Image: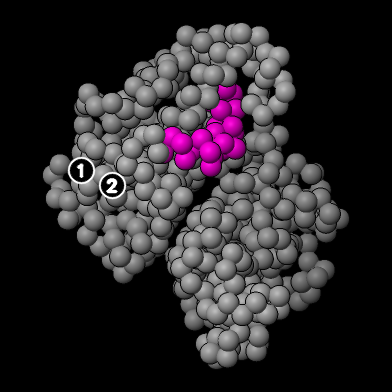
């Protein structure tokens, strides 16, 4: 476990925003800055909104910081939307004009969180009293105090092996109640920058969800920092971090943000909580259940459904044998799919799975809440953990991942085909039409004939092979967002 440096005197997040511990937040209404209601608010509420917006703005700008020079942490620049800003005026103007909607959402989140913090601080639980360090983490504190000490490593050691062959990508999530997501956001941003990690981290009051890449030394220090942090150490263990070959090269940048959900199902965690999921099955237990299911002579009349919770472009290139794979483009469509097919699940035992397990947490909770299933089970650790134990098991094909690798291969099976000629093929490319963000399966032979677009309309535009600008536009929607 790494030692932690003492707080330094450098200007940090807390010095950039107003302190909110003295705010009276008895009025906990969610304020929408774009509504006409703002003009009618009383003076006290206007002040609360103003403070929250300043904090949200400062936090957003903070997450865009990058070192001005390699391994120089004192001077900061900012990187956002593939642009580099060397002065505060430039980044502030950019954020104000280009990210107003995000600041609006962050402001609402800050207002909610401030209200929760005030209410909980008035009546600390006994567990909090016994753990003053945990209480310290929910008050004003220096982010730098929770960064691992890397002074014993040279800069070269920290970034060595960041490439796809020698580096590593971590995939993890942790459902737990977080009082101050904005602080966790600032800490995660500083931690990843400190360790030269790229990727994406989602934070909410219900927990954290991350995919980060870098050198193996950097990812090891990151895991140790997470497991030593009082906010997460009681909920996570080393086995909760799934690893695969990759590195910082798998992601174009670091993106850390506060959201309402750590996986976007489109339903408030207050309505469907992670605290009421299905029964977790280890990879070994899940393997036995799938084996039992596949051994039945008539799967259509079986009392069991093997349900894939992922999106159609994920299940297309890899899936469990005999599974039911919904034709949905986003995970936020999953609840609607369940609602329309409730009779399909009535009195059935459901075996659910997804990439790393996180979508099953909320998905199984939603299905259970409908009260039609006999039993609901989910694969702990997802396909990722299953393939570590059973690379030649009942999962056939590749595992889709949301980064520049597109997919991970654990076996030689190809379950999909070229969209044009029907030949076995499972390597995704981007549609060659500029601004199109769709994935396409087109084999080398068809590519040589110019078939590089996702549909007839795009193909007719004849824009040639996918180029870097097309990749950039795509990454915003698919590659670098979490399963959506």
Residue topped by disc 2: 195
Q: Along the polypeptide, which appears first: circle 2 or circle 1?
A: 1
Asked whether 22 falls inside the magenta stretch, the response is no
Crowd rating for badge 1 (residues with CA inside 10 Å; few <14, some 14–19, many 20+): few
Where residue 244 appears, x then y in whole percent? Answer: 39, 62
Horizontal side of residue 130 vs 26, given as left or right = left
**Mark in the foreground, 2 or 1:** 1
Which is nearer the eye, 209 or 444? 444
Horizontal side of residue 461 vs 222, given as left or right = right
Which label number is shown at residue 398?
none
Which is nearer the eye, 432 or 12? 432
Where residue 363 appears, x then y in whole percent? Answer: 67, 49
Image height of 273 relative to 155, above or below? above
Label 2 with label 1: CB-CB less than 8 Å = no
The residue shown at (20%, 38%) is 149
How far apart are the two marked residues, 2 and 1, measured between alpha carbons? 13 Å
Image height of 100 relative to 335, above or below? above
Asked whether 108 falls inside the magenta stretch, the response is yes
Which label number is shown at residue 72?
1
Segment tinted magenta in the rendering: 91-114
Which is nearer the eye, 260 or 234? 260
Which residue is most to the right? 343
Where residue 45 appears, x then y in whole percent? Answer: 61, 12
- Badge 2 marks a residue whose secondary structure is loop
Res 48 visible: yes
């Amino acid at each position: 476990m790494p030692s932690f440096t003492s707080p330094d005197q450098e200007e940090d997040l807390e010095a950039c925003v107003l302190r909110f511990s003295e705010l009276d937040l008895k009025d906990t209404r969610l304020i929408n800055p774009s509504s006409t209601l703002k003009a009618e608010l009383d003076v006290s509420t206007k002040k609360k909104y103003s403070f929250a917006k300043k904090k949200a703005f400062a936090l957003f700008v903070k997450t865009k910081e990058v070192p001005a020079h390699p391994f120089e942490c004192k001077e900061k620049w900012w990187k956002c939307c593939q642009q580099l800003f060397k002065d505060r005026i430039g980044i502030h103007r950019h954020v104000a004009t280009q990210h107003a909607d995000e600041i609006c959402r962050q402001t609402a989140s800050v207002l909610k969180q401030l209200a929760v913090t005030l209410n909980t601080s008035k009546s600390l639980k006994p567990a909090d009293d016994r753990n003053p360090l945990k209480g310290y983490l929910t008050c004003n504190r220096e982010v730098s105090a929770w960064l691992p000490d890397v002074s014993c490593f040279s800069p070269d050691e920290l970034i060595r092996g960041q490439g796809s062959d020698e580096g590593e990508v971590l995939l993890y999530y942790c459902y737990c109640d977080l009082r101050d997501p904005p602080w966790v956001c600032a800490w995660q941003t500083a931690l990843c920058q400190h360790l030269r990690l790229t990727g994406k981290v989602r934070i909410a009051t219900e927990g954290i969800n991350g995919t980060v890449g870098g050198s193996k030394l950097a990812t090891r220090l990151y895991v140790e920092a997470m497991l030593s942090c009082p906010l997460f150490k009681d909920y996570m263990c080393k086995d909760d971090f799934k690893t695969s070959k990759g590195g910082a090269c798998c992601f174009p940048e670091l993106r850390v943000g506060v959201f309402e959900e750590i996986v976007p199902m489109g339903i408030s965690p207050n309505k469907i909580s992670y605290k009421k999921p299905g029964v977790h099955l280890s990879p070994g237990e899940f393997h036995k259940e799938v084996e039992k299911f596949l051994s039945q002579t008539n799967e259509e009349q079986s009392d069991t459904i093997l349900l894939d919770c992922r999106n159609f472009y994920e299940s297309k290139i890899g899936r469990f044998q005999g599974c039911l794979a919904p034709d949905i483009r986003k995970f936020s469509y999953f609840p609607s799919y369940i609602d329309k097919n409730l009779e399909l699940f009535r009195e059935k035992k459901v075996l659910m799975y997804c990439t790393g397990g996180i979508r099953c947490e909320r998905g199984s909770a939603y299905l259970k809440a409908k009260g039609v299933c006999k039993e609901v089970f989910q694969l702990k650790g997802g396909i990722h953990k299953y393939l570590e134990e059973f690379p030649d098991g009942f999962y056939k094909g590749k595992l889709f991942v949301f980064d520049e690798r597109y997919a991970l291969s654990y076996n030689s099976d190809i379950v999909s085909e070229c969209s044009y000629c029907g030949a076995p093929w499972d390597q995704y490319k981007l549609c060659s039409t500029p601004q199109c963000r769709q994935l396409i399966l087109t084999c080398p032979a068809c590519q040589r004939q110019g078939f590089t677009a996702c549909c007839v309309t795009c193909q007719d535009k004849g824009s040639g092979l996918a180029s870097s600008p097309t990749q950039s536009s795509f990454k915003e929607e698919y590659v670098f967002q979490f399963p959506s």
